[in-house]
Amino acid sequence: MDGEPKLDVYKRWVFVATFVNYAMSHWTRKCYTNVKVQLMDQGLTTYVLASMDSAFMFTYAGGSFITGALGDRFSPSAVVGIGLLGSSICLAFITFGASSGIATSVSFAAAWFVGTQALHGFFQATGGPVNTAIMGAWWPKKSRGLVFGLWTCHQYVGDIVAAFASAWILSSPMNWRYAIIIPMIVNALWAFINFTLVPNRPSDVGIRTEEQRALLAKSGGDEKAAKSLPPPIGIRQAIMIPNVMSYAFAFGFFKLINYAMFFQLPFILSSNFSASTANIISSLYSFGMMPGGIVCGFVSDLYGGRRASVCATMMLILVPLLVTFAYCMDTMPVIPMLVLLCIMGCLVGGPNNIITSAVAADLAEDPSIKGNNRALGTVTGIINGSGSITAAIGQMAIPVLHDLGEAHGVGYRYVWLFLVACTLVGTGLLGPKIYKELKPTPAESQGFASSNVSYQSVPTSEAAPMSEAAPMSEAAPMSEAAPMSEAAPMS
């Protein structure tokens, strides 16, 4: 199997493998939260459970910076495999602790369970940055938006599988521990698939992309020089890439909106509905997030990769909907509320999903790093980690605003208006990038056009002779390449 068919087969396999990787991360992340009642029955206190969640979020945010860089320095599929295997080990520790006297030990329970979840957060941090790095090596910018939009449904698939699997086990005669043990075993087995069967980049399986052909032509036909990988960039160098930090902070505000809706919406709705009804209604927000990334990715591809403009448009459409909830939620009929929540999920989910996938991949191709393709994991880690920290800090304002609203007799109005402010600030941070997309310089316009070149595979065993190699005018050296982060204008 040579040429394009071989490339297509491997691209499908990489898509499925990394999709399952991230879905498994969410299943193992979610499974323990679905049995918190059973863990309390074993002796854990609400304080220990809350501390476990906090420890996980802290190490997950910090670990994103580290694991992203590790994915650029070592085999990304091996790093993902270690993350999955580590998650399974942490679940084994939780199961062992809940099945022994550790859970009832006042002096040891907190250290055991909180420490385990802190370690679990670090292993889980491999999921986003490193899987994105693998995907980015296989998909060029031309078709990346829609593909990554579909790919980011992995997290919702993992959450759904976790919910249904836990519900089935807890409603059956099976021991509740199987809700943790089953994903633990499946996750560990899938880790070994990554160690052995997931290629990191096309060259690992003898596929030469158009980019590599250009490098071969530049190196004068020197195969060894063309195949050699540049050294990975450091975190400081990645931070200096144009637009990385603006996207990172914008993502933080967008993620804060998502966290607030995801965690607080059932409580907000419970002031007007029963607890069960509130949970059902709030689930429509999560349902709406699934197509959000697909819509955002498809539209940004349609408009030549102008992802910042599409993200900003979706967030600005969100503003009047948030204002509507701020002033009309208590009197809003149920049907319009259901429709608006679904639309809000789509609008929030689009930018949240695309920024940590397709946008990060675009940024990692910025000409400022001179064609170094070992930057994607680090860039994704910076965006994901910075966003998680910003969102975690912002979450602290929500109970304060709620108490203030209760004191003034307006309920959650100040919380909704706070989310409006977060939407506007996050969108404003994308302003410079939006301006570049809408008002490109002539050089950037040429870069937009060049960014629409897709991968073409050439079997390495049939290296083209120099006389047939792509001329330098068609395959510019990467150090002189036009900006990859910019989008092609509509023809």
Image (cartoon, helix red, strand yellow):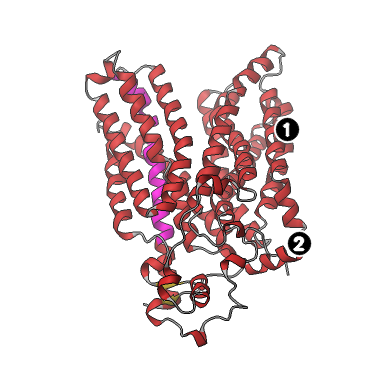
Q: Nearer the viewer, residue 448 or 189?
A: 448
Query: Which residue position is annotated with label 2?
Result: 441
Disc on res. 310:
none
Q: Which residues are magenta?
A: 14-42
Instruction: Report if residue 334 lies within the magenta region.
Output: no
Q: Residues within 10 Å of mark 1 (few under 14, many from 20)?
A: some
Give amino acid for label 1: Thr
Q: Is residue 29 above or below residue 202?
A: above
Left or right relative to 42: residue 207: right
* Closer to the eye: label 1 or 2: 2
Q: Secondary structure at mark 1?
A: helix
Secondary structure mainly formed by the magenta segment: helix
Which residue is situated farthest in the right direction here? 439
Is residue 37 rendered magenta in the image?
A: yes
- According to the picture, the residue beneath numbered tag 1 turns out to be 324
- The structure residue drawn at horizontal position 37% and vertical position 40%, both measured from the top left corner, is 123
Note whether 285 is above or below 153 in the view shown. Answer: above
The 10 Å Cα crowd at callout 2, few under 14, some 14 to 19, many 20 or more, is few
Task: Identify the mark nearer the N-term, 1 or 2.
Answer: 1
Asked whether residue 7 is in view, the answer is no
Provide residue 202's location: percent of width, then percent of height: 42, 67
